[in-house]
Image (cartoon, coloured by chain):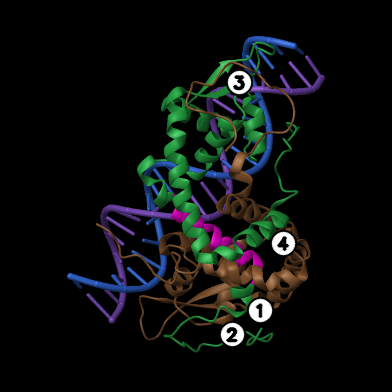
Chain colours: A green, B brown, C blue, D purple
DNA sequence: TATTGTTATACTCTATAACTATA
DNA sequence: TATAGTTATAGAGTATAACAATA
C-alpha cells in the first residue's frame, strides 16, 4: 500500500537491498501458490527414488482404492481432462503399475486396475508419502496440521472436480 | 488405508457411486494443490475483464513497489528464471503497462518501471484483487484468514525463491 | 572470467476440437 | 444422438544450454 501515486515512475535506481513485496506477502492466493510450490518440490524429492510425480501418485492411489472403475471416472475425480489422462495412463501401463481392461458391461470403456507390481509398489509409495507428509506437518507444527487441512478444504471444495465437461461446440 | 492387500486386483466392476479417495482427501499436499487450483480459478475470474494472469499481476505489483530495480532482481524475487521472464516482460511492455530502461550504472541491465498507464492500471488491479481476496477470505472464515496465511508462509518459506541459479554447464 | 539479458529448446500441465467405436 | 477413449494441437509454466554485450 505504501508508495506510488498516479504519476509516471521516476528514474531513481535504488539498486541493492531486499525487495518490497508490498501487500503481496500477505495475499492469501500468493501464499497458497508459494506453499504449493514448496510442497511439490518436497514431494518430488521424497519420491525421486521412485520416479513418480504428484499426479501419477494420486492416480495410483485412486485406482488402488477403486479398482475396476472407468478411466473417465478416475480422471474426473482428480480434475484431469479425459484427453490428458490418456498419456498419463499409458505411462503407468508402460511401467506395469496399472492396466486397462475392456469393461464387459460397456465395451467403450476401460476398467482400471493396479497390477500385482503396482500393488507392491504402493507400499513404497506409502512410505515415501509418509516422509513427505511428515516434512510438511513439521513445518506447520503438528498441532496445526488438522486445522490447516480443514481450511484448505474450504477453499478447494466446489472446485473444477467431480464434474466432467461436455464436449463443446 | 482400508482395502487392498498385496494381490492382483480382481475383475469386479463396482460401477456407480462416489469414489473412495482413501487417505488422499486428508493429505496436506493434496489439499494444498486443490486449494491452489481453486484460488487460481477464482483469480482468473476476478481478473478476466483485465486480462491478467496471476504471474503478470505479481510482476506488476513488484515493479510498482520497487521501481528501477533490475529485471533479474524482480524475476528472482518471484522465483522466475531470467530466461522465462523475458517474454513475460515483453508482453507487459507491449501492453504499455511497464517498461525497460537502460540502467546508467550497469549498461548490461534493464531497470524496470511502470508506465503512467501501468500506474493507473494498478488501481483497477487493486480492486480486482480485493474482490478475489474477499472471496477466499469468506470461504475460510474471516477469523481464520490470518492464521491460514501464517501457516502457509511456514510451508512456503525456504522455497526456490530469492535465489537465482548459477548458469550451468 | 562473470553477469545481464536474450534466444532456442524441451518437458509438463492444461484446454479444445475432432475422430473411432461403441451405445 | 450421445458417450468413452483417443489423437492432435496449442498455450502457459518451468528447466537448461548457449550466445552477445558489458562488467
Distance Cα–Cα, label 3 vs label 4: 40 Å
The chain carrying label 3 is A
The chain carrying label 4 is B
- Evaluate if marks 2 and 4 touch, with contact meaning CB atoms under 8 Å apart: no
Q: Does the stretch in magenta take in A35?
A: yes
Q: Do marks 3 and 4 share a chain?
A: no
Distance Cα–Cα, label 1 vs label 2: 8 Å
10 Å crowding of disc 3: few (<14), some (14-19), many (20+): many
Q: Earlier in the sequence, mark 1 or mark 4?
A: 4
The chain carrying label 1 is B
What's the magenta region? A27-43
Q: Which residue is mark 3?
A: A111
Q: Residue at x 57, y 23 (%)?
A: A112
Q: Is residue A45 left or right of residue B49?
A: left
The picture quadrant where one finds residue B22 is top right
In the foreground, C16 or A34: A34
Secondary structure at numbered mark 4 = loop
Q: Which residue is mark 2?
A: A9
Which numbered tag is attached to residue B47?
4
Distance Cα–Cα, label 2 vs label 4: 24 Å
User: Where does the image place residue D22, in percent across and percent down from the top left?
Assistant: 30, 77
Distance Cα–Cα, label 2 vs label 3: 60 Å
Amino acid at each position: 500500500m505504501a508508495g506510488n501515486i498516479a504519476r509516471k515512475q521516476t528514474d531513481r535506481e535504488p539498486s541493492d537491498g531486499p525487495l518490497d513485496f508490498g501487500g503481496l506477502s500477505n495475499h492469501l492466493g500468493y501464499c497458497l501458490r508459494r506453499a504449493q510450490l514448496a510442497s511439490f518440490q518436497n514431494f518430488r524429492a521424497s519420491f525421486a527414488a521412485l520416479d513418480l510425480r504428484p499426479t501419477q501418485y494420486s492416480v495410483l492411489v485412486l485406482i488402488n482404492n477403486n479398482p475396476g472403475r472407468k478411466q473417465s471416472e478416475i480422471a474426473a475425480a482428480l480434475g484431469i481432462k479425459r484427453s490428458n489422462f490418456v498419456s498419463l495412463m499409458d505411462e503407468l501401463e508402460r511401467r506395469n503399475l496399472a492396466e486397462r481392461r475392456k469393461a464387459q458391461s460397456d465395451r467403450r470403456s476401460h476398467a482400471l486396475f493396479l497390477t500385482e507390481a503396482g500393488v507392491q509398489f504402493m507400499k513404497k509409495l506409502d512410505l515415501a508419502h509418509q516422509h513427505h507428509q511428515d516434512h510438511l506437518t513439521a513445518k506447520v507444527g503438528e498441532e496445526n496440521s488438522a486445522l490447516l487441512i480443514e481450511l484448505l478444504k474450504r477453499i478447494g471444495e466446489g472446485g473444477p472436480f467431480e464434474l466432467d465437461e461436455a464436449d463443446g461446440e
